[in-house]
Image: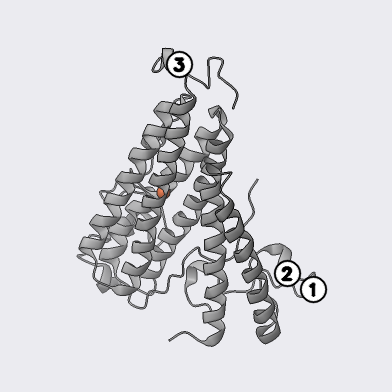
């Protein structure tokens, strides 16, 4: 189960609203490599994981990604607060505004709503961990791209924190992959599926 | 500029973050003695920071179980975390 901590994982206080920035940052909520997908991917993959280390990691990282989702939504909210109609007209945020006003909705920067097709739960530890490693790199690149396009320090500071977390998660998933390959049956390296076939208990 | 209260509040959050990051590290290094020692040091630090905060500013509230069963019910008091206007 889950319980709520009434605070952000890293503080966000944005002084200047900016609909253009909101319109690109929202991709890390509902985009293909965003935090909503990250969280759903890891929490969903847990059930077929054979090893306790990896069950723990998916639970803890999946939970942290929920906190990242909240941070990204907080950024979008603070960037679109108290805007006048004139500040929205003619910006790339206008199309979003038509559909959602200033409600926070999971879409990619390019406008596609979030979909479960962004994630996979293959029931195979090797396939799933490789997906997770790739997901962390793709999320890191997305933060790199946002950092390239944004020059407000109130936004850059939390974005850099989030970028660093992708690097840490990549590291942890790499360790999960190593401990998994160490335990796989070497005679049957690729065909062996420890979540389905009988596996060596740790 | 952050107030002294905000600074202390953020220091507690940073300690919580260090604790979480060690927990995550321990998931893949369950035998690592140095990490478990660091974890208990940070847990102690968290406790003393919270004591300090509560002496100066009243209850430290992050989880609903920290809220006293008082009237009126104060869990709903703003600002909520995403509003970024906290006086904490
Ligand atoms: Fe991540």
Residue found at x 42% / y 43%: A37
Check contact, mark 1 vs mark 2: CB within 8 A.
Answer: yes
Q: Are marks 1 and 2 on the same chain?
A: yes
Q: Does residue B42 appear to the left or right of A26 in the view shown?
A: right
Classed neighbour count for the residue bearing mark 2: other residues with Cα under 10 Å, few (<14), some (14–19), many (≥20): some
Local secondary structure at mark 3? loop
Local secondary structure at mark 1? loop
Is residue A106 visible from the viewing direction of this image?
no
Is residue A162 visible from the viewing direction of this image?
yes
Judged by depth in the image, the label closer to the viewer, 1 or 3, is 3
Q: Does residue B55 appear to the left or right of A28 in the view shown?
A: right
Check contact, mark 1 vs mark 3: CB within 8 A.
Answer: no
**Residue where numbered disc 2 is placed:** B67
Q: CA distance from mark 1 to mark 2?
A: 8 Å
Q: Does residue A42 appear to the left or right of A106 in the view shown?
A: right
**Residue where numbered disc 3 is placed:** A192
Q: CA distance from mark 1 to mark 3?
A: 57 Å
**Residue where numbered disc 1 is placed:** B70
Classed neighbour count for the residue bearing mark 1: other residues with Cα under 10 Å, few (<14), some (14–19), many (≥20): few
Q: Are marks 3 and 2 on the same chain?
A: no
Chain letter for the residue marked with disc 3 in the picture: A
Q: Quadrant of residue B34?
A: bottom right
Q: CA distance from mark 3 to mark 2?
A: 50 Å
Q: In this rendered view, identify the residue nearer to me: B83 or A68.
A: A68
Local secondary structure at mark 2? loop
Name above or below for residue A176 compared with residue B62. above
Q: Are marks 1 and 3 on the same chain?
A: no
The spot of residue B36 in percent (x, y) is 60, 54
Residue found at x 38% / y 45%: A170
Chain letter for the residue marked with disc 2 in the picture: B
Classed neighbour count for the residue bearing mark 3: other residues with Cα under 10 Å, few (<14), some (14–19), many (≥20): some
The spot of residue A168 in percent (x, y) is 41, 51
């Amino acid at each position: 189960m889950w319980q709520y901590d009434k605070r952000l994982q890293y503080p966000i206080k944005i002084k200047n609203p900016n609909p253009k920035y909101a319109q690109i940052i929202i991709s890390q909520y509902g985009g293909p490599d965003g935090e909503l997908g990250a969280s759903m991917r890891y929490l969903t993959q847990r059930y077929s994981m054979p090893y306790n280390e990896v069950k723990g990691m998916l639970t803890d990282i999946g939970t942290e990604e929920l906190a990242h989702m909240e941070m990204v939504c907080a950024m979008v909210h603070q960037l679109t607060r108290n805007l006048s109609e004139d500040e929205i007209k003619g910006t790339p945020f206008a199309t979003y505004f038509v559909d959602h006003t200033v409600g926070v909705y999971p879409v990619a920067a390019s406008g596609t709503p979030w979909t479960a097709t962004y994630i996979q739960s293959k029931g195979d530890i090797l396939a799933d961990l490789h997906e997770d490693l790739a997901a962390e790199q793709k999320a890191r690149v997305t933060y790199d791209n946002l950092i390239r396009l944004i020059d407000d320090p109130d936004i850059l500071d939390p974005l850099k924190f989030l970028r660093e977390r992708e690097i840490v998660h990549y590291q942890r998933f790499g360790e999960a992959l190593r401990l998994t390959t160490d335990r796989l049956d070497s005679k049957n390296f690729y065909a062996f599926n420890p979540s389905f076939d009988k596996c060596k208990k740790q | 500029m952050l107030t002294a209260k905000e600074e202390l509040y953020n220091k507690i959050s940073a300690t919580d973050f260090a604790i979480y990051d060690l927990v995550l590290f321990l998931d893949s290094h369950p035998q690592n003695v140095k990490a478990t020692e660091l974890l208990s040091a940070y847990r102690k630090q968290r406790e003393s920071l919270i004591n300090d905060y509560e002496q100066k500013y009243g209850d430290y509230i992050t989880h609903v179980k920290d809220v006293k069963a008082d009237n009126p019910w104060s869990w709903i008091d703003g600002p909520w975390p995403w509003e970024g206007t906290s006086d904490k």
